[in-house]
Amino acid sequence: MRTALEVKGLTRRFGKTTAVDNATFEVSRGQILGFIGPNGAGKTTTMRICASLDLPDQGDVLIDGISVLDDPRLVRQRLGFMPDSYGAYSDTTIEEYLEFFARAYGLRGRDRRRMIDYVKDFTALGPLEGKLISALSKGMKQRLCLAKTLLHDPSILILDEPASGLDPHARVELRELVIALADLDKAIMISSHILTELSQVCSSVAVIEAGKIRATGTVEDILRSVESSYVEVFVRTLAPLEAVQRALLEEVGVRSVRRHKGGLMVELDGDEQALAGLVQVLVRRGLDPIEISPNVVDLEDVFLSLTEGQVQ
Amino acid sequence: MTDLTGQLDEAPEGDRLDRLSEWVNPILIKEVRQAMRGRYFKITFCITLMLATLVGLGVLLVLIAEGGDEVVMGPPFFTAMYACLTFAALVLVPFSAFLSMGGEWDENTWDLLVLSNLRPRQIVFGKVLSGMVQSLLYFCTFGPFLVFAFLLRGIDLTAMMVALAVAFVLSFLLTCVSVAVSSLSRGRFTRVVLMVLLSAILLNVAFGFVAWGSQLMFLPAQLHDTEAQLAIAISMSIGIAVAAFFFAVTSARLAHPEENRSSGLRITALLVVLSILAWETLYDWRSPDDQRILLTTCLSFAALWVVSVFFCTEPERLGRRVAVTLPKNPLVAWLVTPLLPGGARGLLYFVFGGLLVTAWMFAYPGLADPSFSYSSGEASVPFVLLAYGVFFLGLPSGLLSRGSGMVAVRVVSRLSIFLFFILCILIPPLIGFLFNVKGLEDFDHPGNIFMVVAGLVSPSPHFAGVGEYGMGGVTLVGVGLLLVVILNAARIYRQGMEMRGAIAARSTGES
Ligand SMILES: Nc1ncnc2c1ncn2[C@@H]1O[C@H](COP(=O)(O)OP(=O)(O)O)[C@@H](O)[C@H]1O
Ligand SMILES: [Mg+2]
């Protein structure tokens, strides 16, 4: 896999706040990187620097090996950036909007026609032909903006919170579009402050908080790194809860036990071996377990543990 | 998608109009479409037309009621129509350009434009052009009214054409100014303040201009005078040059901070000064007039000085993106140094421009009329201006050069140059007044550049002239310049070293 986007030691300060603090990660062709962090974590700042719209105080971003600092014009030809505040001209139709940007990108004649048709087709905007942008729903505007971003056939796409404010249906459609784009061998970086939006589509994740990258890697990598340290199990028994709690706390490998929805939430050191041990203990001591369900750790939990619960 | 790019090299087809439109500035097409569909243009266009019809009818009725056949109805009717047209072309059109530029921030589309690799000057050019298209539309719509005015008799065709042409050029200039003003701030509140200011300026200019146009209609004979013709030609071309300068200001403001935001401005400012010199040369070619030459020299220095206030307070670094655009030839690169961004190079720019003006002042009358000569006082004017200019620029900007990377420091530095200039004029008489120092009570002292120059040009008893300051004045200037050199030595050295590095890197062909 070829590295398409490489962020190296990026730092950006605004006065006293350090919006991005020594961030390093990369995205390859055909890969979708989820860039996740709470509001104000520095996602937009990082992405704007990647898109050559802002400058870092330190560090650099390489797009296909070209520095955004040295040759922003070349970089812009290969890169499509969709800002979180997607711009839309008033008093303009979808057609005119796309045609204007196609002209701005230097597409001429039949090529322009073909490219506009292609992106309209790809984002399913065809049926809306002739409509004024101001009459579009948010999801439609979002798709139009994506269409505009694809006009010059960029090999790298940076999408800043594309799913925010969309209804569930539009979100599913967006997800499908993103997957289709990755299948075209584009490198995609997509940010969000809501994790569930991304966990299904991303091949890798970078978690950012307060400007610092807390974790990077594939979704499985990150899950494993958290899973291996402890397991949480929900336990319900016929025996009184106090007795069970006391008994469990005496056991080795039990980190903590707390009440939870008519049962107990037990935190164990270790992996599934420890879980097996717990089942044995409950049966051996005659505590009559009626439900033992290990809590599946998902990205959301990882995120919460990495960002100290500031997720919104 | 990727399979499509393979076919990009195919020749574009379509009819001729389509093919022509490929080369038109895309912003222009967008702007015109947007304007034609938008409310602003539709409403203002209809109101202007209605107003023109009503005013025209009113004027006609009054004229007929007043005198019937004896009154020459052409000029008053034309003036009324001209006033409406001028209002549209000088107020409405520039204002719409202001709004359209602001719309790019409000609608969050600016970043999209930058990403599409349109250069700031293309964007600004598209905006200005679209203003001109709208202006032209107004001119065409008013055509029938103007023809009607002409048919009413009493209108000189030349005068009418001149009045219309000047109005169009002025519309262009004001559109450039409006776009420049709009680029000053992206904050909503500041933009409202700017909007009020701009409307005041536009309205004032429009009213003044209507007055000029109407007196031209009533007294068209003044156009037969060559001086008047030349004066109009000169002001029009200077207007265009100034418009170009505002254009450059806007492009520079909109450019990326790491890009070269200075060279374009420096070159345009120099062109404006050169065009002033060129016109003065043309105007006075047969008989050079020393007073007018000196006035032109002083004006040129003043223009150079004002723009240099901004140049000499620029951040020091060339910036990564400028370094790679230097000329490959080391000699050429060193020669264009005054035109490159950077504070110390800003000082150099003033010196360079000043020497150019000085060279003109001595070369041109000598070529035109070998018997021409300046008095010794007159001959020293450009050098005095140069020395004072460097002093006023170099002292505050040199002192604050360390922090020139920060916006706030740059603003302070710029303000302090103007303040320093004013204080140098005000402080000595103030001291003289407060402490009753004899000889210091008036404004006639070496700190006041105006008096110094006036004394040099006409050493009458009324002005003290250079004689009174004598060696004392020269010493003062010498000490001042020494201070400037000391304060600026460090940054001149640093910028010189950076240039050397960048030029070496360029000429060895790396990057
Ligand atoms: N132009 C700016 N001026 C000052 N501070 C800024 C600017 N842009 C962003 N910030 C600050 O940088 C931090 C990161 O912002 P941002 O990158 O927009 O976060 P995110 O996109 O993750 O919500 C925030 O604390 C924000 O206040
Ligand atoms: Mg953001």
Image (spheres, helix red, strand yellow):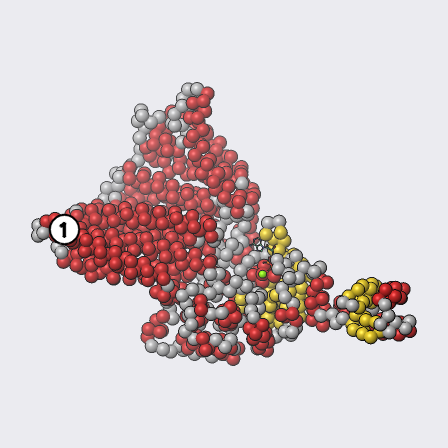
Q: Residues within 10 Å of mark 1 (few under 14, many from 20)?
A: some
Chain of residue at mark 1: B
Q: Is B213 positioned to the left or the right of A131 in the image?
A: left
Q: Residue at x 34, y 35 (%)?
A: B379
Q: Residue at x 36, y 57 (%)?
A: B96
> Can residue B204 be seen?
yes
| Whether residue B121 is situated above or below residue A147 in the rendered picture | above
x and y, in percent, of residue B62 in the image: 15, 51
Read off the residue under disc 1. B63
* Image quadrant where one finds the C terminus of chain B: bottom right
> Can residue B71 be seen?
no
x and y, in percent, of residue A255 in the image: 83, 63
Q: Is A41 positioned to the left or the right of A102 in the image?
A: right
Amino acid type, label 1: Leu
- Residue B32 occupies which quadrant of the picture? bottom left
Q: Residue at x 37, y 57 (%)?
A: B97
At mark 1, the secondary structure is helix
Q: Is B27 positioned to the left or the right of A50 in the image?
A: left
